[in-house]
Structure formats: C-alpha cells, structure tokens
Image (cartoon, rainbow, N blue to C red):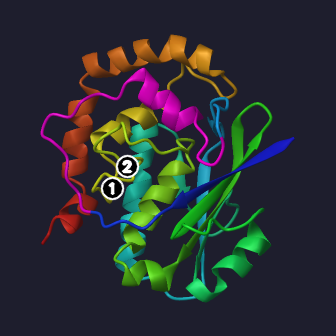
Amino acid sequence: MSRLLVLPLIFIALIVSWPACSATPSTNHFITIALGQEYSKGLSVLRRWEKPIVVQIHHVRRVPAQVLSLVDEHLSLLTQATQHSIRRANQDANVDLYIVTQQTVRSTWQRVAEGRFPSDALCAAQIKTRKGGSIESAVILIPVDTATSRGRLLSCFVEELTQITGLVNDSDEVYPSIFNDRSTNQMITPQDWILLRTLYDAALRPGMSASEVRRKVPDILQRLVADGELDRATQLLRRSELHELLNSN
C-alpha cells in the first residue's frame, strides 16, 4: 500500500543568513519535522528513501542554465548532508519536477499527483511512501512565472527538493531553517544539514515510530556535534555558489 503526502511552499520573502555559531537541533525538532504532518494532527512513522534519488525536470518554458547549475549544486549539497545518492537525470527518475505556468498548475497537478493543489501554496510537492515508510516516488510542481516574479524560483527548487528527502513538516522552533516559515533563508542552513544527516543515519530506518526515533536521535545528535559536523556544514555552505549568489547584493 502506498501513502501520499503534500508538501507546500507558502510565499514569504527570503535571504540567506545564519549566526556564526548555530545551535544544534533537538530531538523534538527532528521528530516534529521528520514525523510531523502539515495538514493533519499526530505523528507518522519515519519516512526516507532507501534507493538513490533521481530527479528529472520537465518544463514547458526554458529554464536558465545558471538556475539548473545551482539546482545541481543544491542536489550535491543534499548528497553531502545525507550521504545518500541524489542526482539529476533525463530518464529513469523517481522524482518528477514539473516547471509549469501559473495557469496550468492545477490541471498539471490533477494529471501527475493526487488530491488538490494546496490553495495557499506557491509551489508544492507530493511524496508516495510504502507501508513501511520507505519513499518510492515524488512529484514537485513549480509555476515558473509566478515564482520568478516573486523572486522565489530558486527557493522553490531548494525547499521542495529538500523536503522530498523525508523532512516533510515545518516548525517555528528551528531557526534559522528552511523548515521555518518565519526564517529568512533561501538555502539549507547548518541546522537543516544536521537534520538531514540525522534522517539518513544508519541507526534509523524507515517505519520507525516516534518512540523508537526518540530513543535513537539523542545519541546521533551528540555524535554529530562531537565530530564537528555543525561547524563543517557551516563552512561548506558558506563556500557554495548558492551562498555567494544569494549574498551578492
């Protein structure tokens, strides 16, 4: 049996900024973002990919080469953060990313996804999971004209591609973070990096309950801090082309 989950991106103005010394996310933060459900109460089981993530972009309008290059860099950052294979390809994909116009958003969603396109969302994604919590496929929809006019094209790519890894919920408690609607970031932060690394840690597995996750995550976070992963993430992200572009003004 497969299950579906919709992941919307609501419009807010974003920039890239985080403190020189960022706080490590807590176990509660991880459970809220990884096991929470944006449109229903309660917690799900842990969801993540077991097979490589392969993204194919379908577009009705030409996407600037620079944007595609930055998308590839973001996928590379996700691969480094999760230590899981994530790449873009032109075939044999399990993540279909549709770049459409605002006029065709809902008709395209009805064709490639299930349910209704979220009325309050600028961009949205939907993951399909097996009964045991393993993600088997995903769909992302981005209205290029509206996203571009609002200065949100790149952040649509970044947030939706990050959320389909399995961190599907938002939280105002994690800051700075792309999972916080009040945060002012257009790219993943060191906190997000730690959440991604925790999700794909070998000590966790798809289908784990909240109580099982709660017993494992404190040790994972403690190990990552001891290994200097937060500082390493900060340096890697600050050296990225995404960071340079978004802070060029």
Magenta extent? 15-40
Q: Main secondary structure of the magenta part?
A: loop
Residue positioned 19% across, 42% down in the render: 235
Q: CA distance from mark 1 to mark 2?
A: 10 Å
- Closer-to-camera residue (11/177): 11
Q: Position of residue 154 (x, y in %)?
A: 38, 69
Q: As shown in the figure, which amino acid type bears the numbered disc 2?
A: Leu
- Closer-to-camera residue (76/44): 44
**Horizontally, is 215 left or right of 129 in the view?**
left
Residue 25 position by quadrant: top left
| Mark 1 neighbour density, 10 Å: few (under 14) some (14–19) many (20 or more) | many
Give the residue pinned by disc 1: 187
> Going from the N terminus, do you reach mark 1 or mark 2 first?
2
> Pointer 1 and pointer 2: residues touching (CB < 8 Å)?
yes
70 versus 126 height, above or below: below
Q: Position of residue 162 (x, y in %)?
A: 48, 51
**Horizontally, is 111 left or right of 20 in the view?**
right
Q: Quick check: can you spot residue 89?
A: no
Q: Is residue 22 magenta?
A: yes
202 versus 98 height, above or below: above
Q: Quick check: can you spot residue 12?
A: yes
Q: Element under label 1?
A: loop
- Closer-to-camera residue (159/78): 159
Q: Position of residue 116 (x, y in %)?
A: 72, 66
Residue 209 position by quadrant: top right
Q: Position of residue 8 (x, y in %)?
A: 55, 59
Report the disc number at residue 77: 2
184 versus 68 height, above or below: above
Of circles 1 and 2, the one toward us is: 1
Q: As shown in the figure, which amino acid type bears the numbered disc 1?
A: Met
Give the number of callouts.
2
Q: Element under label 2?
A: helix
